[in-house]
Amino acid sequence: MLGTGGTIASTPGEAGAAPSLGADSLLDAVPELDEYADLRVEQVAQTPSFDAGVETVAAVAAAVGDVSADGVVVTHGTDTMEESAYYLDLTLPADVPVVFTGAQRRPDEPSADGPANLLTAVRTATHDRLRDAGGVYVAMDEELHAARDVTKTHTRKLDAFASPDAGPVAAVTREDVRFDREPGSRSRQFDVDPSAPDATVAMVESGLGVGADGIEFGLDRGVDGVVLEGTGLGNATAALGDAVADAIAGGVPVVVTSRCLAGPTVPVYGTPGGGQTLRDHGAIFAGDLPAHKARLKLLVALEATSDLAELRECFASD
Ligand code: ASP
């Protein structure tokens, strides 16, 4: 069990809540854990996940590599949990299951959900089917989700995570773990050091009347790539469409996602800024990856190649 902070380890304070509890102290609230695992605990970070960086995930990756365990549970803030899990899924051949969990309510709050989520994470991480399949997951509110598919969909509810297109991998009941689909990683793996990526990727969202500034500022600052969060099937305003053409002509790759919660991007429209026009300019379509995950994939892919055709290939499959 690797502790990284988050609400599950937070206490209230005059200046506001902050992570302060060691991961080992979280075990006291869940004596049932002993029935499932012989846990060894390591604190690898103590941060709110909204301020975590790739160095936190790199520390988790290093610890996963060092421990000889049948499974790993990572306690983590919920804000970027899906990003850390996905980043690990892209960069670490996880032969043993790695299950992230956290909480929406601190341990001192009524109905704190950390203890139940920790139990769900340990029960799934030690399940035979996960031990056989490996891979990286998120376990929250009695559900297990694949790192590739899961996203935080609610700011405060305990039921805050969903896999909008794929659905959960399993539901966890009081009695058993019920699998809805095959466990295992669905992410393409990149042979890069998780602590290495140092590219800068701008994220720009399209919407009613949005101009080209977001991409132009990025190009002026010398970004290495752009993720354009389009509307609907992956469309943008004409101004952004023209800026996409300029970016790609200047050697800066552009990846198009959708701001819709579910569904893939599909290039259809031929107006300036329409998806087919963006593709004709050379933009890469990210399928159902949301913008924040497409950014991570582009960061990792740029470590491996800056060739546009190769980058396109990286996004053509999971
Ligand atoms: N709300 C967050 C959490 O659940 C804070 C964070 O991301 O660390 O932990």
Image: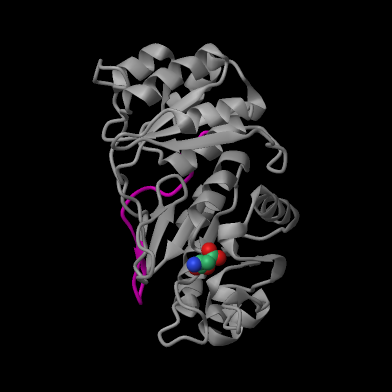
- In this rendering, would 98 be left or right of 275? right
Of residue 185 and residue 16, the one placed in the foreground of this image is: 16
Observer able to see residue 39: yes
Q: Is residue 278 left or right of residue 313?
A: left
Q: How is the image coloured?
A: one colour
Q: Residue at x 32, y 27 (%)?
A: 237
Question: Would residue 71 be seen by someone viewing this image from the given angle?
Answer: no
Q: Nearer the viewer, residue 190 or 39?
A: 190
- Residue 314: within the magenta? no
Q: In the visual, does 151 lie left or right of 307? A: left
**What segment carries the magenta color?**
171-189
The residue drawn where x is 46% and y is 86% is: 109
Return the x and y of residue 201 as percentages of the image width and height.
Answer: 57, 34
Q: Residue at left 40%, top 41%?
A: 290
Residue 227 vertical position relative to residue 18 in the rendered view, above or below: above
Question: Looking at the image, is 207 positioned above or below residue 159?
Answer: above
Q: Return the residue found at the far right.
A: 66
Q: Is residue 125 above or below residue 266?
A: below
Q: Main secondary structure of the magenta part?
A: loop
Residue 22: % across, % down: 68, 77
Q: Is residue 195 left or right of residue 168?
A: right
Give the quadrant of residue 244: top left
Quarter of the image where the C terminus is located: top left
Horizontal and vertical percent for residue 182?
38, 47
Q: How many marks?
A: 0
Q: Quadrant of the N terminus?
A: bottom right
